[in-house]
Amino acid sequence: MGIDRRSVMSMIGFTLPAGAAVGAAVGTGIGAPATAQSSTGVADRQLRWLIGATRRVPVPADELAAHVAADTLAAIGGTDALNEVFAQVGALTAGRSLTDAATKAERLATAGAAQWVVTVEVDGTGLIAGLHFAGYHDTPRSWAELDRRARALAPNVSFAAARVGRDGHTALVHGIAPDTRRPLGSAFKLYVLGALADEIAAGRASWQEKLAIRDDWKSLPSGVLQDRPAGTELTLADFARYMISISDNTAADHLIHRVGRARVERELGRLGNADPAADLPFLTTRELFVLKGHDYPRLASRYQRLPVPARRAQLAAIDRVPLSAVTPWTTPRRVNGLEWFATPADICRALAGLSDRYRGAGMAPLGTAMSTNDQYIGLNRRRFPMVWYKGGSEPGVLTVNFLAGTDRGEQLAASLLLSDPERSLDEAALLPEVIALARGGLELAARR
């Protein structure tokens, strides 16, 4: 479902909706910094300036203005706010380059024992239009190390790493309870994207089709579209990009309504979910918010006791509950009963299925949606030029799911699903380690 973080200091590895991708992921690194690589790209030059600036805090306003676009600096909160971020991150030393493209550069960097993935994007004038600091943990060097570290994260852990064949089928390389069903959080949105892609391939929808935002289809954050006025029109491609890249719940619900709940439910099987019945009826995010945040636990208990047909009939009443009547919760609520569910092996198959759809004519927006946010995984993009990502979280649930394409034309998938039905998971503290394990799964699976 996601957690909305808007202040600069509290944003843990997430992107500002305004477009200035600033964050500071918590965590300490292990081991020595990598060796820096030389580069002549504009984005990388700005990145190396940024890393140097962290050693000269406070950086004068005129120097920041010479390197950071004015609207980006304003979105961050101004000169003082950016200097505060620099002070929090610490004095950095540049490490090896991960990405050096025309408009985007990414490097590892160290500050004492902490390691970071530092990312900048530049605009047409060469000024920094987006920046992000994400905590980096060392990549596991073996499956045994990955297993040990993964099992330490939560009471319930499932993992799968798989190779994706050219026929779209997956072959499991390694797993921890890979066929054990877990709650997904917002990773359920992969099935919504698949249903939309199939509707477009069948000619019943178009990426450029306009859909108006409706108040009765709005949900709660994560996301930004819930703040747009009713009647605002976006293309289905826009809804898909919001749904995947920033996990916009309102975007997901609009797409579920547009393609139809039954169509999404059929997509579970089409994308390889081994037990689609566990997700019936397929809930919107708004419905889950109501079930867990309104008249809890009475409403949730009554709903769960019903058979699937009666649950479907109950959804109409649930949809009439105003969002203002929903109270947020901070501890796990029925994560093993009221959620969306799949196994890591299921998710690898879903990612493979989406990749297969992407190869169809006119499916570029699917790839855009899946690749806009790579959760700062820290892969060397020369070796892994394509990275798709979708994660998910709610109290007691944290999942990360990746598809990566190598420079040799291989495709690999990794899915790590964590849950605790009793206690909330500390997402900010866990995320750098969780990302490191997913990175390790992809790199280990790529070995011959």
Image (spheres, rainbow, N blue to C red):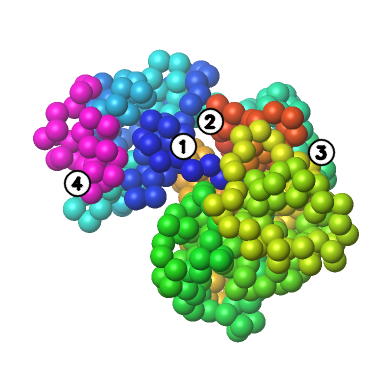
Label 2 crowd (10 A; few <14 / some 14-19 / many >=20): some
Give coordinates of residue 406: x percent, y percent.
56, 50
Q: Earlier in the sequence, mark 1 or mark 4?
A: 1
Residue 130 image-quadrant placement: top left
Disc 4 residue type (three-letter): Ala
The one nearer the camera, 364 or 3, is 3
Q: Are marks 1 and 4 in contact (CB under 8 Å)?
A: no
Q: CA distance from mark 2 to mark 4?
A: 29 Å
Q: Earlier in the sequence, mark 2 or mark 4?
A: 4
Give coordinates of residue 206: x percent, y percent.
53, 79
Q: CA distance from mark 3 to mark 1?
A: 28 Å
Q: Earlier in the sequence, mark 3 or mark 4?
A: 4
Which of the two marks, 3 or 2, is nearer to us in this view?
A: 2
Q: Residue at x 74, y 71 (%)?
A: 262
Disc 3 residue type (three-letter): Ala
Q: Are marks 2 and 1 in contact (CB under 8 Å)?
A: yes
Q: CA distance from mark 1 to mark 4?
A: 22 Å
The one nearer the camera, 108 or 420, is 420
Secondary element at image label 3: loop
| Residue 119 in sight here | no
Secondary element at image label 2: helix
